Amino acid sequence: LNRIPVAVLGATGAVGQRFVALLAEHPWFRLARLVGDDSAGRSYADVVRWMGDGAVPASAQAMRIEALEAPGLPEVVFSALPAGVAGPIESRLAGAGHKVFTNARDHRMDADVPLVIPEVNPDHLGLLEGRKGGWIVANGNCTAIVLALALAPLQRAFGLDEVHVTTMQALSGAGYPGVPAVDITDNVLPFIRGEEEKVESEPQKTLGRLAGDRVEPAGIPIHATCTRANVREGHFESVHVKLARKASMDEVKAAWREFRGPPEVQGLPTAPKQPIHLHEAEDRPQPRRDRWLEGGMAVSVGRVRLGADGRSLRFVCLGSNTVRGAAGASVLNAELCKVRGLL
Amino acid sequence: LNRIPVAVLGATGAVGQRFVALLAEHPWFRLARLVGDDSAGRSYADVVRWMGDGAVPASAQAMRIEALEAPGLPEVVFSALPAGVAGPIESRLAGAGHKVFTNARDHRMDADVPLVIPEVNPDHLGLLEGRKGGWIVANGNCTAIVLALALAPLQRAFGLDEVHVTTMQALSGAGYPGVPAVDITDNVLPFIRGEEEKVESEPQKTLGRLAGDRVEPAGIPIHATCTRANVREGHFESVHVKLARKASMDEVKAAWREFRGPPEVQGLPTAPKQPIHLHEAEDRPQPRRDRWLEGGMAVSVGRVRLGADGRSLRFVCLGSNTVRGAAGASVLNAELCKVRGLL
Amino acid sequence: LNRIPVAVLGATGAVGQRFVALLAEHPWFRLARLVGDDSAGRSYADVVRWMGDGAVPASAQAMRIEALEAPGLPEVVFSALPAGVAGPIESRLAGAGHKVFTNARDHRMDADVPLVIPEVNPDHLGLLEGRKGGWIVANGNCTAIVLALALAPLQRAFGLDEVHVTTMQALSGAGYPGVPAVDITDNVLPFIRGEEEKVESEPQKTLGRLAGDRVEPAGIPIHATCTRANVREGHFESVHVKLARKASMDEVKAAWREFRGPPEVQGLPTAPKQPIHLHEAEDRPQPRRDRWLEGGMAVSVGRVRLGADGRSLRFVCLGSNTVRGAAGASVLNAELCKVRGLL
Amino acid sequence: LNRIPVAVLGATGAVGQRFVALLAEHPWFRLARLVGDDSAGRSYADVVRWMGDGAVPASAQAMRIEALEAPGLPEVVFSALPAGVAGPIESRLAGAGHKVFTNARDHRMDADVPLVIPEVNPDHLGLLEGRKGGWIVANGNCTAIVLALALAPLQRAFGLDEVHVTTMQALSGAGYPGVPAVDITDNVLPFIRGEEEKVESEPQKTLGRLAGDRVEPAGIPIHATCTRANVREGHFESVHVKLARKASMDEVKAAWREFRGPPEVQGLPTAPKQPIHLHEAEDRPQPRRDRWLEGGMAVSVGRVRLGADGRSLRFVCLGSNTVRGAAGASVLNAELCKVRGLL
């Protein structure tokens, strides 16, 4: 009941809105400040162009938007700032003692910034050990998080020699206004700037091993082709992996089904009961039908096909890009920091 | 001016309509008969639910639909019959001396049926050599044709060790009524029954080598994941290949740019001037913008990325599924047979 | 806790699924039987092609589908049978003592069948007074219900001289498989068979006056043009009315805002708190954003423009076609019958 | 063969591109200059984000974009400038002796600017009579042109007492980038700023009567509700009119079918053979299937329903918003001025 006051930076944008939705009624955090320089002084409901279905959460509607410089910024800050803008601001805030949970890509690959998926690499928070004052914890790129969650059980159980992934990414991943309707109607767009680089590099860190004060990259060759599909929400990915060791279909499925975060993560308010939902129906998962499983925090896997060699494995995976792949990811990180005593 | 009379079987279906559109004003063939059992006796314009933009071709509007058994079926027959139904009918017609050009899958893998893409394997018509009476020439599955055209120049120049492909296939590929709008709006469907098998097997024959009276399969491991996208026309494919020999980016691009069918094919009425259009713009090809290049007979390739090893090659390709991948493919086959003296 | 057992006829169809969703956890009714002749004996989860997001309600998954003739059909029956099929079956069931709540159009205009919207004409249940044995209560056409709800407050307060309506109707209104995606993508379909007749006639009964054992039609000239839009759910209607008496903008808005059903209706489990939501934002209501207000049971009104004459009134309205306009409508009717002691 | 050199202002925008497409191979006009301040000095192909299918017209690709102030601006200018910007520039150009054909709304209602649809009110060019130096001729709003063309034959034959129209307008009407895909997917947007005012006022002028040096407004009460639909091109309108005189269905249909511009207009290169296409199929016209009739210059009318009173008439109409409703409209105006000796 003594909830921790938190701020959201960039609260009116696409991801900022998801932060507001997730934090408006959070049991541990209290949405204490909405930051947006352009619209400081106005009420959130007046300024925001709400993208979700339904209305702006009641508790946020009347909140005033404040400038970043306004006094009284809470210690705990969620950043939905755009890449490029986010980097220097987040560094400054961390320097001033703030705990920053960021969705921006700017600091994700910094050596001293944990890039965390609580079910996958909660130990990477060890990078913060012994640190005084503020710090930054990043969540990954929306596509990379979904992929890393689907790969983690395979990596643990069988090792991974190579990964090919083709994505069909949702419109909401491009923010607002994002993709013009005249471009995507009756179409697929074969290119998303900067995306393939992130999908190929970030899982190296998330799936890597903490070794003292650094993370050893996983060193898995990942090859990505990223496209935009005419879907509002839910990144869909077609994946082919070469397992390092032979596996049976039963072993592969069990690896996904039995995958759980450590007990401290399983109990977090935003954690899905089951991080990976394995679909047996041949025509699932589908973005529209499965993106909101467990409030958008579960990743779906389906269409599993294992080659006769026991190593060539194909499947599709799917996850909410704005929740599991963005705001929900940072909220879960913050919850983990809370139970770890870092907040 | 003495055009060869031809029939279209299944003339009212999605592919049948494309046959009608392509043959209505053909310089060498004369649309002499439209066959459809259900609606025999009625005019084509009355029966057909025309899917294309604009109107039914004027020359076909008033044609009566005839039953298959009606006397006077032309020797040359284009078959747009559905799989399963097509097989026995086509066999019977060939047995009765007809030359059948079919889009159906039933006979594609038969040892004595050439599965031909004129720019790729025109020599496979050699399977018909010395044959008396009728025969069947098949075009491939719509997705497989686009893929085989994109692969052929690579196979010739560098050899192919392995192929991974993820497709985003158009709605028109499912025929009519095909995919319900409530299923595909704001969605991707991750499964198309029987499609992956065809994509993995048919190019083995098309890209195979004619050895006497049989075709030696190409033996390239192809791994396919086929999905349905919310696009009306144009199959889009994301491909990763492992080249057998190292290549430079310039060599790879030259292989596609310079790819042409043999001279006898280049002059065919329906043949594209350039079978492969290589796009340099980073956001092309796109289904809506590029599917109708060269009347829908050209395949687009773009987003070419070559790994540092000179062998790992990624690209996307795109082609009209109803023209290049279906009716146009069989019309081009028939034109090739004509110049070869087989008709 | 002693919930009334009910059956759903046509439980696997588009509207049948909505009945199942609404009744699976209903406080007063217990989903006791799912009827579907084709698939009798199989489990609901095996047979149904679930159209909603997420999964089949847990309590319905394992239920066996029964044939209509199987013994033990509950007294209370919800019918989601298709028009034409529904009529004779529903008559037979009523004759055998069942209380039938139907979404089918077959009996809607029958003199002895109440066509009820609980907030609008609950008194029409008076048609059942003194009846022994079974009877039929119908809900209206999905488009007509939304329109009648938007018109009712205007009719009461000012009278209605004339109504023009152009609809943009959702795909789910066509059932499953419904509209082919190749027809509606990048398109509007200007015709829905039989729809305009229903929109023009049914509100005459719903808005009519109960006079003894018959309903006097409202006698409002209604002119409808019904089209299909590329929207999954939510019928949107552009309406122009000529009020019988002059009104001010404030009076018009107050009529909508203050509109409520009688107290007995307001307390029903499925009743919306506010039947009409008046939107002041110039770009609302929108189908995607507003169709699920109050669980899909509220109708939205917006873009209100009143002519200088105080009588020419334009507005748009919107409502969920499968809930407010179909299954939810009949469930609400049944709840009303329950509190009236008719069940 | 001595083609008149012309300039296009705002050549890279959505409507500017249509001007370029229509003028690139025009028999009477020669595309001599492309004006765009931001990108002056660069080639058109480098700068333009081509929205059409296929490629930029070959003759325009290498043209340099010039600043407005660059010397040598041709006398004849087509303006695709945005509203607000267009007004003062067009006034200045006319003052300097240029003949300006504009698609912008700024001067449409000016008393000395003819607002012309050649088939409807070519005589309004009389406003230019005796004028020395430059002038402006405007085409109407895209929605208003389609409506005015559909109404003109009715007005002439029967008179019009009142018009109600609800539009479903295409995405391309919002320019580029225009409507965000996340807003319109699975949705209808019920508001287009400023649109209803134009639809209600402009036809008063187009359908008005030239009386000396002024146009007497038609004085028809028009009531519009304008919405945005998920359609790329083609404004669709549902119309109800009250005819001033009783008519039979045959008379109404004949009025549309027989409607033609004066002979001088019928021979213009861009003029459709038949300005109004009357569709008898109950499910036509449809935007996707019918928007490009006669190169996008014909308007479609269908779903005609006449009330028992012989005066209440309902129908739908459809036309290309970027061609008939914008660039094609001004090109046709310029062609008319040419044959009138005004150029």
Image (spheres, coloured by chain):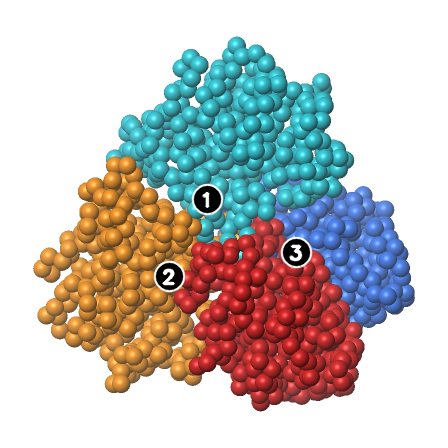
Chain colours: A red, B blue, C orange, D cyan
Residue C80 quadrant: bottom left
- Separation of marks 2 and 3 at Cα, in angstroms: 32 Å
Question: Against D200, is A23 above or below?
Answer: below
Alpha carbons under labels 3 and 1: distance apart: 27 Å
What is the crowding at mark 1: few (fewer than 14 residues within 10 Å), some, or many (at least 20)? some
Q: In the rendered view, does D228 fall on the left or right side of B288?
A: left
Density class for disc 3 (Cα within 10 Å; few <14, some 14-19, many ≥20) is many
- Which residue occupies the foreground of this view, C208 or A127? A127
Q: Quadrant of the N terminus of chain A?
A: bottom left
- Residue shown at the point (25%, 76%) measured from the top left: C76
Residue receiving disc 3: A189
Q: Where is residue D311 in the image (x, y as percent from the top left)?
A: 29, 33
Which numbered disc, 1 or 2, marks the residue closer to the eye? 1
Mark number for residue C320?
Answer: 2
For badge 1, the amino acid type reads Ile
Q: State the residue position of label 1.
A: D192
Report the chain holding disc 1: D
Please report the residue visible at 42 percent of the width from the left and 57 percent of the height from the top: C287
Amino acid type assigned to the residue bearing label 3 in the image: Leu
Chain of the residue displaying label 3: A
Q: In this view, does B17 lie to the left or right of B309?
A: left
Res. C182 image quadrant? bottom right
Task: Check chain identity for marks 2 and 3: say if they share one.
Answer: no
Q: Can residue B223 be seen in this view?
A: no
